[in-house]
Structure formats: structure tokens, C-alpha cells
Amino acid sequence: MGLGGISIWQLLIVLAIVVLIFGTKRLRNIGGDLGGAIKGFKKGLREDEEPAGVEDKSKTEQHREHVVDAEAEKVHQEK
């Protein structure tokens, strides 16, 4: 007896039928999509756990570059 009264042979037969119906390429794609969805879900959970005062460094750098560009343009227009 295997899992919940299902023998290993029954599991192999079900697996063979699933592979015949969907094909290995489609099953591989489904696995990759499922893995990507789980990674995205975990990333979303981590982002929610960050304190509200913590900023993303890349956003801060982009803001600084924008301010520097705006100041340089202002100085250039004054000349």
C-alpha cells in the first residue's frame, strides 16, 4: 500500500495517462509557470512585510538623477 491506499503501480498508470494527454512539453511549461507564480507570491509577501519608511534604493537613485538633471537644465537655461 502506498499513499492513502493507492499503490505505486496505480500512481504510475495515472502519471502515464497524464503524460499521454498533456505531453511532456506542456507539463514542463505548466511547472515553470507554477514556479514563477510561487516566486511572485513570495516576493509580494516580502514587500508587504517591509516597514513603510524603507525606500527602494533604485527609486531613490532615480529621484536623485532626476533632481540633478533638472538643476543642470535650470543652470543651462539661465546662461
Image: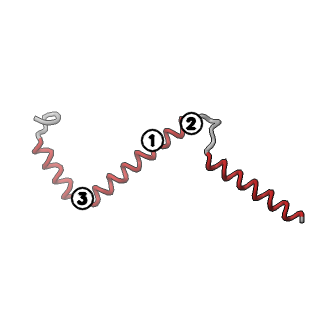
- Residue at x-position 66% and y-position 50%: 61
Q: Quadrant of the C terminus?
A: bottom right
According to the picture, the residue beneath numbered tag 2 turns out to be: 50
- Residue at x-position 37% and y-position 49%: 35
Tell me if 37 is positioned left or right of 52 in this view: left
Q: Nearer the viewer, residue 17 or 25?
A: 25
- Residue at x-position 29% and y-position 59%: 26
Above or below: residue 67 compared with residue 73: above
Which of the 4 image quarters holds residue 4?
A: top left
Q: Secondary structure at mark 2?
A: loop
| Inter-mark Cα distance, 1 to 2 | 13 Å
**Amino acid bearing label 2:** Glu
Residue 66 pos. (x, y %): 72, 55
**Amino acid bearing label 3:** Thr
Residue 36 pos. (x, y %): 40, 50
Residue 28 pos. (x, y %): 29, 56
Neighbour tally class for label 2: few under 14, some 14-19, many 20 plus, Cα within 10 Å: few
Tell me if 36 is positioned left or right of 60 in this view: left
According to the picture, the residue beneath numbered tag 3 turns out to be: 24
Neighbour tally class for label 3: few under 14, some 14-19, many 20 plus, Cα within 10 Å: few
According to the picture, the residue beneath numbered tag 1 turns out to be: 42
Counting residues from the start of the chain, the first of labels 3 and 2 encountered is 3
| Inter-mark Cα distance, 3 to 2 | 40 Å
Q: Secondary structure at mark 3?
A: helix
**Amino acid bearing label 1:** Lys
Q: How many marks?
A: 3
Q: Are marks 1 and 2 in contact (CB under 8 Å)?
A: no
**Residue 77 numbered tag:** none
Q: Secondary structure at mark 1?
A: helix
| Inter-mark Cα distance, 3 to 1 | 27 Å
Tell me if 64 is positioned left or right of 6 in this view: right
Counting residues from the start of the chain, the first of labels 1 and 2 encountered is 1
